[in-house]
Image (cartoon, grey):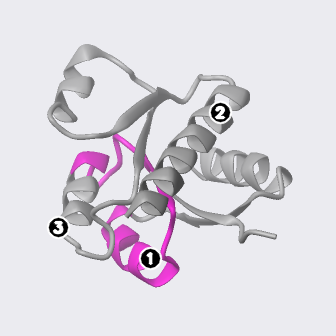
Amino acid sequence: MSRKKRVLIVDDDPRVRFTMKRVLEHLAQYTVLTEQDPCKALSSALAFHPDLIILDLCMPGKDGGDVASELRHSSALRNVPVVFLTGIANPEEASKCSGEDYTMLSKVSAADTLVDRIAGLLARESAAAATC
């Protein structure tokens, strides 16, 4: 049996963290860690060794784009897929992520859309790792 995939969720909204954690853990395929403070996201990720990171795009203190930039500068985390989750998906926000290999989803997306996207990204990463 393969190990559960590890997902780190960084979001300042406790309802979002709780709901996403519950949905993913209910599937019994994921181990989930949540972090509310974007300033602690890098240290949480380094300690947790996630297979995928979900970042809220707009957070106080440090936005998801800043956190993603920190992650990309870490040799241990630079290849971990990042999914931006936002309540305000508009072209201006999307442009913050241009040129990077990120996925952006709206917080109002159905849970099954989120789960399908996460599974697809993790399958892609597993296939890429198998060919190395």
What amino acid is found at the position of numbered circle 2 in the picture? Asp
Quick one: label 2 or label 3, which is nearer the N terminus?
3
Residue at the disc numbered 1: 44
> Which residue bears the numbered disc 2?
116
Could you say which disc has been placed on residue 73 in the image?
A: 3
Nearest to N terminus: mark 3 or mark 1: 1
**CA neighbours of label 1 inside 10 A, class few (<14), some (14 to 19), many (20+):** some
Q: Quadrant of the N terminus?
A: bottom right
Q: Is residue 98 above or below residue 50?
A: above
Mark 2–mark 3 Cα distance, whole angstroms, equals: 28 Å
The span from disc 3 to disc 1 (Cα, nearest Å) is: 15 Å
Horizontal side of 89 relative to 16 (left or right) equals left
Was residue 40 drawn as part of the magenta stretch in this picture?
A: yes
- Which residue corresponds to the image point at 54% horizontal and 30% vertical from the top-left? 107
- Residue at (71% x, 66% y) in the render: 4
Question: Is 100 drawn above or below residue 34 in the view shown?
Answer: above
Measured as percent of width and height from the top left, residue 87 is found at 46, 28
Q: Is residue 11 magenta?
A: no
Select label 2 or label 1 by which is in front: 2
Element type at mark 1: helix
Of 93 and 130, nearer the camera is 130
Instruction: State the extent of the magenta-drawn residues as a range.
Output: 38-65
In space, the residues marked 2 and 1 are separated at their CA atoms by: 25 Å
Q: Secondary structure at mark 2?
A: helix
Q: Nearer the viewer, residue 15 or 34?
A: 34
